Image (cartoon, coloured by chain):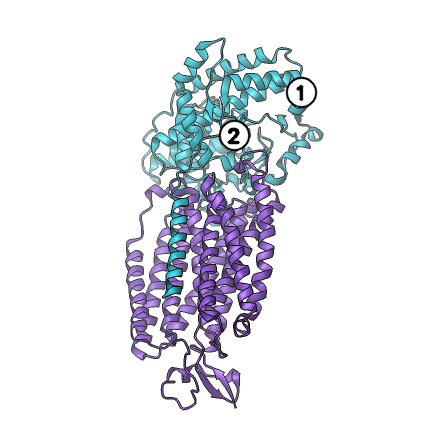
Chain colours: A cyan, B purple
Amino acid sequence: VGSCRLVWYAAYGTALTVLAAAGCAQKNDYPPNLAFPSRTDLLVLKSAEITPTSLTEKQTVDEDIARFRDLGGKTADPRSAPADARAAIDALLKEAFGAPAASKIALPDDPAVQHRAEALGLTPDSLTQGGKLFRYHCLRCHNITGDGRGPAAHSMYPFPRDYRRGQFKFVTSLQGGKPRRADLTRTLTEGVRGTAMPPFGLLPEPERDLLARYVTYLSIRGQVEFEAFAAVLAGETSDPLGFASGRVKAILAEWEKAEAAPTVPAAPNDGVPGSATHQAAVKRGYDLFIRKTDNSCITCHGEFGRKPVLRYDVWGTVAKPANLAATDPIYKGGARAEDIFARIRGGIAPVGMPAHPELTERQVWDLVRFVKSLPNPHELPPEIRKAVYPEMGGVP
Amino acid sequence: MSLSPIRPVPRWIHVWAVATAIATLVLLALGQLVTSFQAGMADPIWPTEPWYLLAIDWQEPSRGYLIEHTHRIAAFSVGGMVSVLALGLFACDPNRLSKWVGLGAVVVLLGGFGQFHGGLIAQRNIPPSQVHLPGAGTAVTLVGLVATLLVAVLGLVRHARGSLIRVLGAGALVGVMVQGLLGGFRVMLNELVGTDLATIHGIFAQFVFCLLIAIAVLTGRAPGDSTPSHARRLDRGSIVLAIVLFAQIVLGALVRHAPVPSPIVLRLHFLTAFVATALAIWLMLTIASDPPAQRRVRAAFWALGLLLALQLVLGVEAWMERFGQYTLPELVKLTTAQAAIRTTHAFVGSCLLATAVLIALRLCRPTAPRFATSDRTDSRWSESAGLEGHGAVVGSGVRGEVP
C-alpha cells in the first residue's frame, strides 16, 4: 500500500508540474532593452561576373560573398565604415524604426513619414503585434533583422529570404519593384514550393496580414541600412543621417507605388487545353519562348528548363531557372495562370529574370498558355510536342 | 540437467524486440539531431514515401533536408520492425481463436494505416487547409485499432500467458503509428501548432521507446535468482526514478522545442536535474548494498552511473552555450559542436530513461518459475504455455506472476 501511495504521489506531482509548466502562457514579447543588431555582413553591391556551376551551399554563403571581389563582383564591409558614420546610421535607424519591442516608422523632423507609413498599415501597434508573431513563426529562419540568417537557416537550401535588400521575387506590381502587401500575404498563405518556406494558410488572416506588415517594416529598415552603409563606404555622402532620412521617404514611396500599381489583367478565354484556340495560343507562346533574342526565355531555361543556366542573384547566392518541362514543375511564385503572367510581365528582378514590357498582353498570355501546357505533352500541338519531347516523336 | 527460467515467448521475438528497441534508439538520435539543427521544417512536404530521396534532384538538398529525411526513413524502418514484433506477439497467443483474430486485427490495422497514409500522400502538394482525411483509410484503421486492442485486453482479462506483453505490443504498434502522425502533422500543421506539436512528438517518442524497452525486457527470461532484500524500497525507488527521469525529459523537450522557453520550464528543468541525480545515487547505493538486486541489474547498474555523470556534464555545457550568451536564446548561432552537445545531451537522456525503466522492470519482475532442461538455450517457450501442472516446474512467482 505504501509503495503504491508513493508512486501515486510521484505521478501526481509530476503531472501537476508538467501541467503547470506546459500551461504557462508563453510571452513572445521582446525584452524592452533589446536593440536590432547593427549590420556586420558584407554588402553585395554587384554579384560575381562568372557563371556559377553549382548551387550555393548555405554554410559557405558568406565565404562565397567574400570571394566576389576576386571574381569580378563588388562588396563592401559595413564594419569598415568610419565610427562616427556608423554611429549616425545606427542612431537614425533606432530613432526611425524603434526596437523589436517597440517598432515604428517615424522621423522626428517629418511627421508626414509616420502618416505615410500608417497609410500603408505600418502603425506602431500593428508592427508590435506583427513582431511578436514574427518572433514565434519566422525568426528561426529569417532572423531578428530579417537577414535570412536565423539559427535554423544554415541547414536549409534555398536559404531563407534576406529582406534587407528591399527586393522580393514574387510580386504582381508588374514593374519589378516592391511587392504589394497582398503578394507577401499570398507567399505566407501558400508558402514557396520547393523550399523550406511552409504555407501559413491555417493562420487567421489578420495574423498573416500582421506578419506581412512586419516583413515590410523589416525590409524598409534593412534597405535604409544597406543603402546608407553603401553610400558612406562609397564616399557618396558626408551626411549619413540626412542621406538615410531621405532614403526612408524614397523607399516608402516605392512601397506606395506598388500598392497603387495596376493588377494582373483578366485572362482571355482560350478554351480548354487541347482545343483549337488553346493550341493556337500554345503555338504562339512556343514561338515567343524560343525566339532568338537577348532576353528570350530559352536563353536561361535551356531545353525548357532541363538545362538551366545558373546565375548569381542580388543576395549573392545562386539562382536556378525552373525546369518547366518537369513532370510536376515547381513554380515557386505560384502555379496559377495569373502568377505566371506576373512573372513573365514583371520578371523576377532579384535573380535577373527580365521583365517583358515590350510584349503585348496577348503575347504574355500566349507564353502563359505554353508554359502551363509544357509539362503535359498531350496538350501540345504535335509539332511542338516533337520539339519539346523529341524522345516521344510527337506521339502523345 | 540444470534449471532454466522459462521464456514467455519464442527466443526470436525477444531478439527482435531488443533489435527494435535499439533501432528506436537510433531513430530517437536522428530525431534529436533534427531538433538540434532546427531542421523539422527543412522539407514542408509530408507525407513522403520511404524512397523519396531517390526521386529528388540531388543538387539541391541541404544538410537539414537530409537529416530530416533520414529521420523519416528510420521511422519507416522502426514502424516495420514494430509491426513484425506485434504480429509475432499475437502469433504466440496460446489460444488458437484469439491468435488468428488478433493477427487478422493487426493486419487490418496495418492495411488501414497504409491506406490512410497513401490517401495523405496523394494530397501532399495541396495546401493543408484543403486536405481531407482519407475516409476509407481512417475507418479501416479505426476498426483494426479497436479489434487489436480488444483482443489484447481480452487476453489480459483471461490471464492468458504472455497477454501483458501482447497488450504492450499492441500499444507499441498503435503508439508508433500515432508517433508517425504526430511527426507528420507537426510539419503539415506548422502554422497552427508549430513547435508545440514537435514537443509532443518528442515526448511521445520517449513513451513509445519505454514501451519497447518494456517489451524487450519482458520477452526475455525472468530473473531466476532470489528476491532482493530491500525489494519494496527498490521497487518504489526505481519506479520513482523512471518517472522523475521521464518528467525531466518532458521539461527538456519543452526547453529544446519552444521558440521562447517559459521561465518556469527553464527553472524546473534545472531543479529536476538535482532531484533525478539524488534519486539515482540513492538507488545505486541501495542496489550496491543488496547482492541479489545487483545480480538482477548488473550492467544497467554501471550504465546508470556512467550515463548520469556524462549527462550532468553535457547538461551544463548545453545550458551554457544556449543561455550563457549575450543574446536571446533563440538567436544563438548554432555551430556543429553545439548541435552535437545538444543532441548528445538529449540522447543520453533517452538512454538514462531506458536504463531506469530496465532497472525498474528487472527489480520489480517476479522471480520466474524454473523449467528443467539439459540445455539452458533450448528452453522452449511453447512448453511454458502449458506449465500449469508441469512436473518439471520447481518454483513459481515469488511475488506473483506476470500474465
Q: Is residue A350 above or below residue B194?
A: above
Looking at the image, which residue is at 49% across and 11% down?
A108
Q: Report the residue that reaches farthest toward the top.
A: A109
Q: For the residues tagged 2 and 1, is the chain the same?
A: yes
Q: Which mark is residue B111?
A: none
Camera-nearest residue between B153 and A347: B153
For the residue carrying disc 1, how many other residues have a C-alpha within 10 Å: few (<14), some (14-19), or many (20+)? some
Q: Is residue B293 above or below residue B385?
A: above
**Dot 1 corresponds to which residue?**
A81
Q: Position of residue B361 (x, y in %)?
A: 46, 68
**Dot 2 corresponds to which residue?**
A146
Circle nearer the N terminus (2, 1): 1
Q: Is residue B347 above or below residue A174?
A: below
Chain of the residue that carries numbered disc 1 in the rendered image: A
* Contact, mark 2 vs mark 1 (Cβ under 8 Å): no
- Compute the Cα span from label 2 to label 1: 22 Å
Looking at the image, which residue is at 65% across and 32% down?
A65
Task: Determine the image quadrant of residue A201.
Answer: top left
**Amino acid type at image mark 1:** Ala
Q: Position of residue B163 (x, y in %)?
A: 36, 73
Q: Position of residue A56 (x, y in %)?
A: 60, 39
Circle 1: element type: loop
Can residue A55 be seen here? The reply is no
Camera-nearest residue between B143 and A315: B143
**Amino acid type at image mark 2:** Gly
Camera-nearest residue between B263 and B214: B263
* Residue A156 located left or right of residue A396: right
Q: Position of residue B42 (x, y in %)?
A: 50, 44
For the residue carrying disc 2, how many other residues have a C-alpha within 10 Å: few (<14), some (14-19), or many (20+)? many
